[in-house]
Amino acid sequence: MVGTAIAVEARDSEYDRLSELKAFDETKAGVKNLVDGGVTKIPRIFLNNLNSNTITPGRRDQPSLHSGIPVVDLQGIHKDPSLRRKVIEEVRSASEEWGFFQVVNHGIPLSVMEEMVKGVRAFHQLDSEVKKGYYSRNDPTKRFKYYSNFDLYQAPVTNWRDTIAYVVAPNPPHPDEVPQVCREIIVDYTKKASQLGDTLFELLSESLGLNPNHLKRMRVTEGFLMLGHYYPPCPEPELAIGTSSHADSDFITILLQDQLGGLQILHDNEWFDVPPVPGALVINLGDLMQLLSNDRFKSMNHRVLTKNVGPRISIACFYRTGYKGGEAADIVYGPIKELLSEDNPPVYRETTINEYLAFYDNKGLDGTSALPHFKL
């Protein structure tokens, strides 16, 4: 580890970071282009000076070998009331303790999940000139786009990751706007993921002691965004990070990860692996859910480590609108009034998705939470 620290320090001498970021951005070819070009040392913009990827024996950021993240079986919850009560309790416990859980028997066939991973991989492996036609950073009119690092110019560390984004709701793109190589499977998968989301919001509502439709009546399902991440193999994985430590900027996230692994969550100041479970989906609660629940449910920091093998593929479906994402982005959200009392006063002020995302995106993935900014 001493050698690693020296290497970072030696390569982190003064340089024009903004110019190098612009040069990378203007290639419109992402991290994959660097790997395809045979890079053996990562460019300076990717050096992880936050040290969130450094694993030192005996330190508290050493990943645990065993994860306590619950796996919740959704089989039969719509038919058996006693089974549903059991699942509601499991979801409540996981949401309060971990902010994460995995679900099985969720209604999305394994074949569809596998095809979705293949579809995302297929897009990212298209010729660079083809992908450049979809590259966009700030164009809100593009409902399908490709980019590397949404916070490229804000974050202190550039992540070793490329991404496609597809707006599921509101106002999805015309099918012709989505590349043929992944068009059909994206529509099919996100439709099924949306149905799962409805079930999850019912369970979360009941976990809070509310009517099953309470959260949906708050219009939390009106915004739905899919991101397809591609993490190329990294020649110096100990110096880079796939995704910096962060909490999600939504109500809930439905994550499909391939079998390569690398996702970790921060719990009680320890990093825990989230091992891929065949057929399972990872569910995590975002900042907006923690705000609605008045800190009863947790939005936990998580990260993705880089590896010298890959690519790693993951598909994250976020329940929230985009910034300036129409009427739903201006809905005012605050702690749910039915959960408040003299003994449980509101922790957060009311805000809108537009206001929240403006702060979150400007901050970038810097390892800190956006929620304190909205505390009373």
Image (cartoon, rainbow, N blue to C red):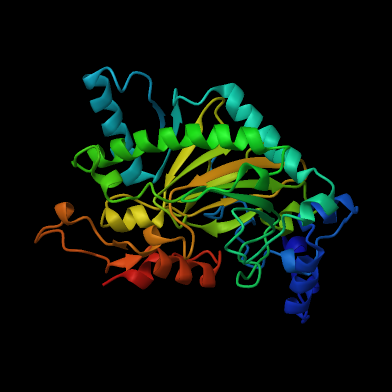
Return the residue found at the far left: 342
Return the residue found at the far right: 38
115 above or below 186? above
> What residue is drawn where x is 22% and y is 20%?
82
> What residue is drawn where x is 39% and y is 57%?
287
Query: Front-most of 250 and 97?
Result: 250
Q: Quadrant of the C terminus?
A: bottom left
Write down the quadrant of residue 149 in the picture. bottom right
Q: Position of residue 290 (x, y in %)?
A: 33, 55
- Whether residue 68 is visible to the viewer of this picture, yes or no, is no
Write down the quadrant of residue 59 in the picture. bottom right
> What residue is drawn where x is 90% and y is 54%?
37
> Is 216 displayed left or right of 71 in the figure?
left
Q: How many labels sit on residues? A: 0
Q: Position of residue 170 (x, y in %)?
A: 46, 51
Q: Position of residue 155 (x, y in %)?
A: 61, 69
Q: Quadrant of the N terminus?
A: bottom right
Query: Front-most of 237 and 369?
Result: 369
Q: Position of residue 374 (x, y in %)?
A: 34, 70
Query: Front-most of 196 and 342?
Result: 196
> What residue is drawn where x is 75% and y is 61%?
4
